Image (cartoon, rainbow, N blue to C red):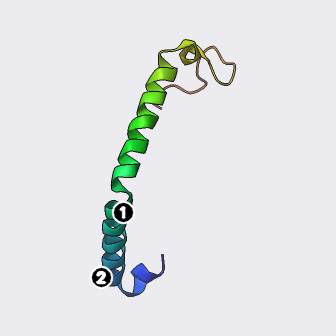
Amino acid sequence: MTLALFDISLLENLVSTSFAWSAKYFGAFLQVLMLATFFVGLGLAFSKYGKIKLGGLDKPELSLYK
């Protein structure tokens, strides 16, 4: 963002104000949405769909630590 090159304190204030506003008006909704997403993910992981392999490979092309 080019504003950071000219006035970093203004950008910090803008980000802080924006975060406070979004936390005030959307905080509880976003927390409930994240909790629901977590439980849907857990449900999928422990269901029959948790065994699905994407890509059709038996083992990964790249190792974990390269």
- Please name the residue shown 38% across and 43% down the image: 32
**31 above or below 47?**
below
Position of residue 60 in the picture relative to residue 27 (left or right): right
First along the sequence among labels 2 and 1: 2
- State the mark number for residue 25: 1
- State the mark number for residue 1: none
Q: Which residue is mark 2?
A: 9
Q: Kindly report which numbered mark, 2 or 1, lies closer to the viewer in this rendering.
A: 1
The quadrant holding residue 8 is: bottom left
Residue 47 is situated, as x and y percent measured from the top left of the image, at 52, 14
**36 above or below 45?**
below
Do the numbered discs 2 and 1 sit on residues whose CB atoms are within 8 Å? no
CA gap, disc 2 to disc 1? 24 Å
Q: Is disc 2 placed on a helix, strand or loop?
A: helix
**23 above or below 8?**
above
Disc 2 marks which amino acid? Answer: Ser
- Please name the residue shown 48% across and 81% down the image: 2
Disc 1 marks which amino acid? Answer: Tyr
Q: Is disc 1 placed on a helix, strand or loop?
A: helix
Residue 54 is situated, as x and y percent measured from the top left of the image, at 64, 24
Position of residue 55 in the picture relative to residue 18 (left or right): right
Q: How many marks?
A: 2
Label 1 Cα crowd, 10 Å radius (few <14 / some 14-19 / many 20+): few
Position of residue 23 in the picture relative to residue 60 (left or right): left
**25 above or below 45?**
below
Position of residue 39 in the picture relative to residue 48 (left or right): left
The quadrant holding residue 23 is: bottom left
Residue 28 is situated, as x and y percent measured from the top left of the image, at 34, 51
